[in-house]
Image (cartoon, rainbow, N blue to C red):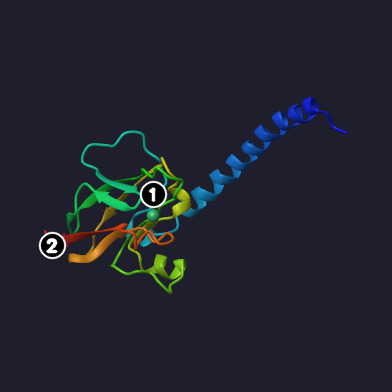
Amino acid sequence: MVSRVRSSIFLGVLIPVLLLAFAACGGTTSSDMSGMPGMSHGGQNSGGSTGGVPAGSIEVKLSDFKIEVSQTSFQVGKSYHFVVTNLSKSTADHELMLMMPMSGEGMDMSEMDKMALYSIAAQDLPPGVSKSFDYTFTKSAAAGELEFACHVGSHYALGMHTPIAVTQQ
Ligand SMILES: [Cu+2]
């Protein structure tokens, strides 16, 4: 028989230990994932979370369920600094993908990742988290040919995609 007092002491010790172990695991996993997509486009700067938004950067706000971008027209060959924030009021993780419009139905995530010009995985964007990256568009895209999208669950169908346009300088 374990008394009430004894079991609550036990939990008081055990829970912080478990949380620490969990936090340590989470840290390594997310930093491994964030470097993977978009490498060939010079977007390897996706790791850092940011406090404050540097001047001239483009804000990308993910919420339930839409994507708001502070600028939707871009020029080929110019480097842009994007700051992506998950403002979800629920517990929804959101991802950010820069790619041509598609519903994603019937495709697995790795296929979609290959087609994306740039992406930040959902596990790296839980609610409240910001990630930044630099990106330079290499070719033009008429309005509607490219978009920022979230393909987690049914988020895309619920409205989580916003078209952008890219023009030659
Ligand atoms: Cu989403």
Q: Is residue 6 above or below residue 152?
A: above
Disc 2 is placed on an element classified as loop
Q: Quadrant of the C terminus?
A: bottom left
Image coordinates of residue 158 in percent, x first then y, are 34, 59
Pointers 2 and 1 in contact (C-beta within 8 Å): no
Instruction: Using the image as rendered, state which of residue 105 and residue 18 is in the foreground.
Output: 105
What amino acid is found at the position of numbered circle 2 in the picture? Gln
* Residue at the limit of the structure toward the right, as seen here: 1
Image coordinates of residue 154 in percent, x first then y, are 40, 62
User: In the rendered picture of this protein, how many numbered marks are placed on residues?
Assistant: 2
Q: Quadrant of the N terminus?
A: top right
Q: Is residue 17 above or below residue 70?
A: above
Q: Is residue 4 left or right of residue 89?
A: right
Q: Alpha carbon of mark 2 to alpha carbon of mark 1: how far? A: 25 Å
What amino acid is found at the position of numbered circle 1 in the picture? Ser
Label 1, on which residue?
A: 46
Local crowd size for mark 2, using a 10 Å CA cut-off: few (<14), some (14–19), many (≥20): few
| Residue at 58%, 40% in the rendered image | 23
Disc 1 is placed on an element classified as loop
Which numbered disc, 2 or 1, marks the residue that appears first in the sequence? 1
Q: Disc number at residue 160?
A: none
Q: Is residue 140 visible?
A: no
> Which image quadrant for residue 95?
bottom left
Say if disc 1 is inside 8 Å of ligand 1.
no
Q: Disc number at residue 168?
A: 2
Q: Is residue 112 above or below residue 36?
A: below
| Residue at 36%, 50% in the rendered image | 64
Question: Regarding ligand 1, which quadrant of the image does it lie in?
Answer: bottom left
Q: Is residue 105 left or right of residue 22?
A: left
> Which image quadrant for residue 105?
bottom left
| Residue at 18%, 61% in the rendered image | 165
Instruction: Using the image as rendered, state which of residue 147 and residue 157 is in the foreground.
Output: 157
